[in-house]
Amino acid sequence: MSYINNSKKTSEIPTEEDLHELIDDLPGMQDAQADKIFKNIIETTAPTKKKSQFWKYTAVAVVVIALASGYFLKINTVKRPSEAAPIIVKNKIQIGTDKAILTLENGEEISLEKETNVVVNHATSSGEKLVYDTKTNTTSEIAFNYLTIPRGGQFQLELADGTKVWLNSETKLKYPVAFVDGALRQVELMYGEAYFEVSPSSKHHGSKFNVKSQVQNIEVLGTEFNIKAYKNSSNIYTTLVEGKVALNSKNSRQNLIPSQQAILNIDREKLTVKTVDVYDEISWKNGLFSFKGKPLKEIMVVLSRWYDIEFEFRDHHMENIKFNGVLLKRQSIEDILNIIKETKFINAYEINDKKIIIN
């Protein structure tokens, strides 16, 4: 249930008028067909109770994606050459899942896996989420744990102060097992991507919450935001969803408002701020890949982390082709590659062990 195309158009949350126009624009679409599809979408996504904007966006997008992709696949099938380029699949690539490695204060490592319950001194894990006791540390000595998410993994974490963290593939977070009430609450995103829903300072005698990430520090008063700071990337991306944060680096300080993204270039020590669609930026934590005007190479980098694969382009011109699309993280990599292939911008692909070669 997915759709991806090479359109240059971008949009915010679609209105009913937008949906009707989208369907009408499908090649060869008759008025009667358009009206029927539009009616089905509205009926399918009619809310039974109040939903957040993100889930309104998701519900509409996924239904439109399902209908539109089937239609485009049909149109493209008619135009396909008589001899399609071969697809070579020598083995199956596993879809990413909930998994992590917990490193305790004594250095012991514990594997956390889906449907496996684990109990340690300060926390319990259901295999999808690690939850720490909400006890306050009254001593000055603070013990730290590490949670490492490998490639092909994701995990959720609830800290001792009630702060919730979603951790993406190839991510490592350092954090205290308990907090001293009234003192600074600080964690460190050592690398990777994490979404924070911070317990407000008002619940902790005014104590602020800080997130260190390489050369920057985020000062938080109680908010929701996303930080992306992967290894081998020259940029750190901080996106504010709700509330207020102050970003501090060596040469600058920047306050962000919701829907703003700060981009800190580590090499040049330069900070820029732009407005973004936060739903695209945080879709990963809700089981989606949302790409808007993204080059195919960037899309493959994101997919490589979730499916734990490497990739290679035989024709480097394909790397810069831009796409719009929404994909489900529970789909197989073959399904996603076939969807991209239907756009006619790639001819074939080969899966060999954990490497994908795109032709």
Image: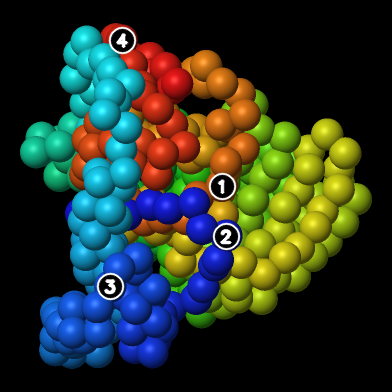
From the image, state whether disc 3 or disc 1 is nearer to you: 3
Say whether residue 199 is left or right of residue 232: left
Q: Which quadrant of the view contains residue 243?
A: bottom right
Q: What residue is rendered at 70% in x and 41% in y? A: 235
Q: Nearer the viewer, residue 145 or 198?
A: 198
Tell me: 55 left or right of 140.
left
The residue at which mark 1 appears reads as 322
Give the left or right position of residue 246, taking residue 283 as reference. Answer: right
Answer whether labels 3 and 1 touch (C-beta < 8 Å): no
Which amino acid does the dot numbered 4 rest on?
Asn
Q: Which residue is mark 4?
A: 352
Q: Mark 3 belongs to which amino acid?
A: Met
Question: Which of 251/104 is in front?
Answer: 251
Secondary structure under the numbered disc 4 in the rendered image: strand
The residue shown at (68%, 38%) is 214
Label 3 element class: loop
The Cα atoms of the two marked residues, 1 and 4, are separated by 26 Å
Pointer 3 or 1: first along the chain? 3
**Residue where numbered disc 2 is placed:** 8
Q: Residue shown at 75%/40% (left/top)?
A: 215
